[in-house]
Amino acid sequence: MTRNDEMLGDGYEIVPYRDLPREHRLAMAWYMAVDGEAWAEVFDDLPEDAECPDIGEDRAGWAAFWLAGLEARLPRIDDLYGDVPFGMASVPMERILAAIDRDPDMASAPGPSFRDAVLAQRGGDAHGTEARWPVILSSTDDETLQDGWHRIGSYVRSGCADVPCLFYPAERHLVPAPGPTAP
């Protein structure tokens, strides 16, 4: 059992990729195909940077270009990875922030808590509060998040009460909880 298992408790469900909400599917596809290039079949099929319209230093324009490419390929991604199970949960903000503050790197760092550091940052709500992309929880005990640091910072600044989360289920998550015994 990991620290994230303690944070999740029984408040999660295991869902095949194709049945995840659209935002969850896009977040995982972005992480696996764009950031990590782990889903080579998807990454290799995405448009080349050279096909991107001239957006100069506009990072938002670049991200929109790649996102449009992923959205257009969701049916193909569903064909490739639709049966892969993922854990999905909505975790109260206070619980996830407490877990982040217990991360070894955070706990030993001088300075403010993660929440206070995020609230001190300037910037708008880049990720919005509607149709929110989930953070991806780590499978190890040395960190709470594997991906989604900018998103959670945006959700803190926006005052969101909960955080949508995805995680890679371990065998223990796939085994149904024992039900009541028959008399």
Image (tube, rainbow, N blue to C red):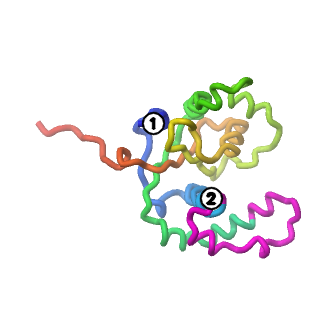
Task: Left or right? Give the position of 152 relative to 25.
Answer: right
Query: Residue 108: which quarter of the image?
Result: top right
Label 2 to label 1: alpha-carbon separation: 24 Å
Q: List x then y, in percent, for residue 50.
A: 79, 74
Considering the image in quadrants, where does the N terminus appear?
top left
Task: Left or right? Give the position of 161 relative to 68.
Answer: left
Amino acid type shown at disc 1: Thr
Q: Please name the residue that numbered disc 1 is placed on.
A: 2
Query: Residue lying furthest left in this view?
Result: 183
Q: List x then y, in percent, for residue 126.
A: 75, 48
Q: Residues within 10 Å of mark 2 (few under 14, many from 20)?
A: few
Q: List x then y, in percent, for residue 135.
A: 59, 46
Name the residue nearer the viewer: 50 or 105.
105
Disc 2, SS: loop
Q: Residue at x 44, y 44 (%)?
A: 12
Reply yes or no: does residue 3 show up in magenta.
no
Q: Residue at x 30, y 46 (%)?
A: 176
Q: Which residues are magenta?
A: 35-64
Q: First in sequence: mark 2 or mark 1?
A: 1
Q: Please name the residue that numbered disc 2 is placed on.
A: 36
